[in-house]
Amino acid sequence: MQEIRRAAERGHANHGWLDSWHSFSFADYDDPAHVQFGPLRVINEDRVAPGAGFGTHGHRDMEIISYVLDGALAHQDSMGNGSTIRPGDVQRMSAGTGVQHSEFNASRQELVHFLQIWIQPDRKGLAPGYEERAFDAAEKRGRLRLIASPDRAAGSVLIHQDARVYAGLFDGAERARLEVAAGRRIYVHVARGALAANGTALGAGDALKLTGTGTLELEQGRAAEALVFDLP
């Protein structure tokens, strides 16, 4: 089974300082048909105005990944972490029993454009944790680079769920193939550009949900950057 979710079908909220597109139900966007996909609960495509951001707020029992596309995102949390992430960086925060954090555009001149991703953990009550890792563009060029996993495989960041997240850059003749184990779900999100996933043409912001498939093939990229979620 496959289901296409076009970019324009997502929820949208423009608060002036924040322009956000929601792939799943979030805040005032309530869509019973798109609440989650397996443990994948949130993909928000956020653009935050210079100097603006999310003030200190709390989370519990969620694996939160930030993936910057353009600009710089400053983070501070109640665990004592403070850093600024940029394109190529992957940040993971395990909210666990509870954590407070803030996120702001680190620039006074440029927008920050990033994906905020939430994955439900495999159990509640975990100790909060934080990690970040830089992945060079060369590692993602024409291939699917593992960026998050339950066992830190291949230098990926840790998530407390039987899920794996890949990132890839595709242009021209570049292509990648992912073998999919029985019973797994695949979610493809095109962050920018365009490509074909199992023969389906996808543009920026589009997504493809796959179940009951043995392989995923990405090809025909046009300046494409994509995330692939291998989910239980």
Image (cartoon, grey):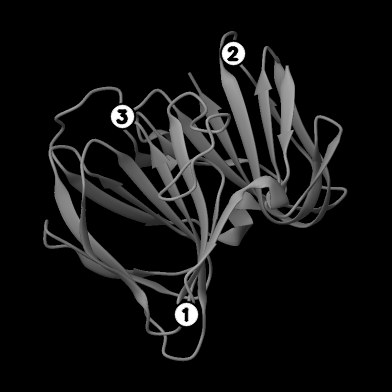
Residue type at tag 2: Ala
Q: Earlier in the sequence, mark 2 or mark 3?
A: 3
Q: Which residue is mark 1?
A: 49
The image quadrant that residue 125 belongs to is top left
Residue type at tag 3: Pro
Q: Nearer the viewer, residue 150 or 187?
A: 187
Dot 2: few (<14), some (14–19), or many (≥20) neighbours within 10 Å? Answer: few
Dot 3: few (<14), some (14–19), or many (≥20) neighbours within 10 Å? Answer: many
Calculate the distance from the C-alpha at mark 2 to the C-alpha at mark 3: 20 Å
Place of residue 42 in the rendered image (x, y in percent of width and height, measured from the top left): 46, 42
Q: Is residue 215 above or below residue 130?
A: above
Residue type at tag 1: Ala
Q: Which residue is mark 3?
A: 121
Q: Secondary structure at mark 2?
A: loop
Q: Earlier in the sequence, mark 2 or mark 1?
A: 1
Front disc: 2 or 1: 1
